Image: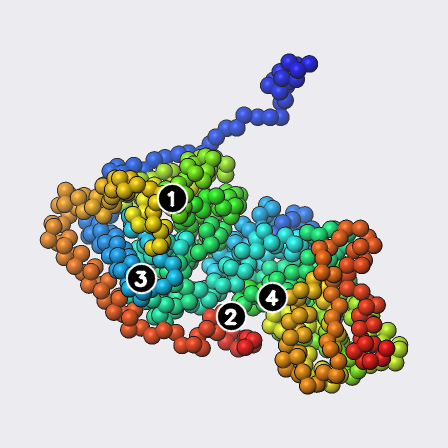
Amino acid sequence: MEAARGSAHVSHVSHVQTSKISVTFKGYSAGSYTHTELGLSDEKVLDMYQNMLLQRRFEQRANQMYGKQKIAGFLHLYIGQEAVSTGAATGIKIGTDSLITAYRDHGHALALGMSANECMAELYGKVDGCSKGKGGSMHFFSKEKRLFGGHGIVGAHVPVGGGIAFAHKFKNDGGVCLAFYGDGAVGQGAIHEAMNLASLYKLPLIFIIENNEYAMGTATDRAFGQPEFTRLAVGYDIPASQVDGMDVFSVCKAVQDHAAMAREGQPSLLEIKTYRYLGHSVSDPQKYRTKEELDGKKEEDPIIRLKAYILENSLADNDALDALDDEVKETVKESVEFAENSPFPDLSAIYDDIYDESDYPYLN
Amino acid sequence: MAELQFREALRQAMTEEMERDESIFLIGEEVAEYNGAYKVSEGMLEQFGPSRIIDTPISENGFCGLGVGAAMNGLRPIVEFMTWNFSFVGMDQILNNAAKMRYMSGGQFNVPIVFRGANGAAGQLAATHNTSVESIYSTIPGLKVLAPSNPDDAKGLLKSAIRDNNPIVFLESEVMYGMKGEVSDDPDYTIPIGKARIAREGKDVTIVSHGKVYWSAMKVADRLVEAGYDPEVIDLRTIRPLDIDTVTASIRKTNRCVILDESNPFASISSEVTYQIQERVFDHLDAPILRITTKDTPAPFARNLMDHYMPSEEDAYQACLRVMYAK
């Protein structure tokens, strides 16, 4: 009897079918693309270089000002991941396309062209900040640049990204949405619900996992039974690609390709392999990784890589690049002055911007 | 005016608003092809098509979040919960993302969205399917919470909710969907959010209520009238913002108050109303405020226990006599 049952399981259950996996996978390795192949001018490459430098110098100063207790709250720094934000922003139409991300959001804001001044002032909680001092480090927003936040609840913003994409499709305005989240967020149900909805409704959405290998102090292989994130796409029947996030051109190319798919109504998944040099937040002692691992990753530094590319291809010389860096340092220095000089919000502002109307009868 | 069921009044409100504004869409479980779990959206798929009447998988977190994002990007979603009990798996989207997005973005992103569905107890459904959610959601700044008790208010308030630029929690009831009443057929009929309704004027005692349990308040009032008293009944209609001025004006007249509330008692709507009354008109009170709520327990299943769990009209009647020192 047992043997008969066993054979029935194998050969007689006709409604059980073997899955046909139709999902496509692609890899965007480092060093695979030139700027001309991507349609980027020499000048644009220098802009990208300067933008990545701006992110790094901005955050180095923010870290310093946090140490001086000028900035309070959480401060999650992006240093090491700059090629992801700049590459992605270069691959989309800023002002038409939308972007939403998690709490490590300074890089995305600066990559979209938000000013160092408004970003630094937000870190200070000042009224000239990009969220008027109501959001802080984790909650940068810009309606003009279509940055739909900076979000602090891990994974919860990804369905919101689905809704932003839904509205692009509903309005048929040609826009797509990039929803960034970290490897840690992959464990949240919200992500999976959003992937299913995007696949079901054919939303113009790119799920972008910035895999920096650690969710706070938990390495991906300690958090996931199956840590190859591109394989998740199979479950939702959407294309997936893995990208070397240390090469800004690889990121740009991947986002260009996947944005084109999204514009045709095909959602997709990108896993961008990256690394953060600093702790999860500034208070992180980083006992979960070795100095050797960190130093090894710094060898692949995305800014040094791009600098080498620029020099090799004679897009600029060292003096010109130093001049760009000097400009960045000046911009960042000015942003600190701007933030210092900007006033704190008036106490009455605590009641501003909650409801659309100004006469809501708050209890007091 | 036409006589409509509560569900028909809701449907008329949505339909009229969707005809007026193409950025409105309805999304939720079974809203389209099934015509709504409680037939609120019956026929709407046929009229508006699948791009605006949208069935979802069972993914409250996902489709609530989708609604929030769509609202931030220029649309005006109506998100239907089969019942509000199921909102809890999507609660983060409501109380964090919908309610706080405008604030945290420094006013850059409005979230004009209506979350609506059946609230409160609906019989022998046991503990997880009988929750009254109004005290949970009304504690969150950024949300407005509406709880109509009759078809006309349902239409007028839902139209206001859809036109409002803020996230709205709109509370209906399985038990009331079939209730009939006269409803305005004015396509611009709106009832202002934040205004209570004096359902019955009187001078002896103020009975405050909202939603389905309002009908219990009216029955209690009828008994009091039969017994020779003159009660005033207030239907709050909106929970947040609370129209405390209408309540306090009544208490200045009656000097007595009983609250009927289908919430569990601890930190409930009745707690808040009571606090605000004593804060504003303490000197006008001639008796302690009494409240009749569901029991301080999960909702039970057994029929006799469930009957015992619900706010009792007899208890409410007796409470009114007590605050009038009539017994």
The reply to whether label 4 and label 1 mark residues of one chain is no
Location of mark 3 (residue):
A66
Q: CA distance from mark 4 to mark 1?
A: 37 Å
Residue tagged 1? A214
A59 w.r.t. B146: above or below: above
Q: Residue at x 18, y 47 (%)?
A: A307
Q: Distance of mark 3 from mark 4, alpha carbons?
A: 36 Å
Amino acid residing under circle 3: Tyr
* Residue B252 placement: quadrant: bottom right
Instruction: Single out the mark in the foreground, 4 or 1.
Output: 1
Q: Residue at x 18, y 43 (%)?
A: A309
* Structural distance between the alpha carbons of marks 2 and 4: 14 Å
Does mark 4 fall on the same chain as mark 2? no
**Viewer-nearest of labels 2 and 4?**
4
Q: State the CA–CA distance, disc 3 to disc 2.
A: 32 Å
Identify residue type, mark 1.
Answer: Tyr
Q: Amino acid at mark 2?
A: Tyr
In primary-sequence order, the first of circles 1 and 3 is 3
Disc 3 vs disc 2: which is toward the camera? 3
**Residue of label 2:** A355
Q: Residues within 10 Å of mark 3 (few under 14, many from 20)?
A: some
Q: Secondary structure at mark 3?
A: helix
Instruction: State the residue in front, A291 or A236.
Output: A291
Q: Is residue B172 visible?
A: no
Residue A272, given in percent of the width and then of the height, sits at: 35, 42
The answer for which chain carries disc 4 is: B
Q: Hey, which quadrant is residue A298 in on the image?
A: top left
User: Which numbered disc covers residue B138?
Assistant: 4
**Nearer to the camera, B143 or A154:** A154
Mark yes or no: residue A106 visible: yes
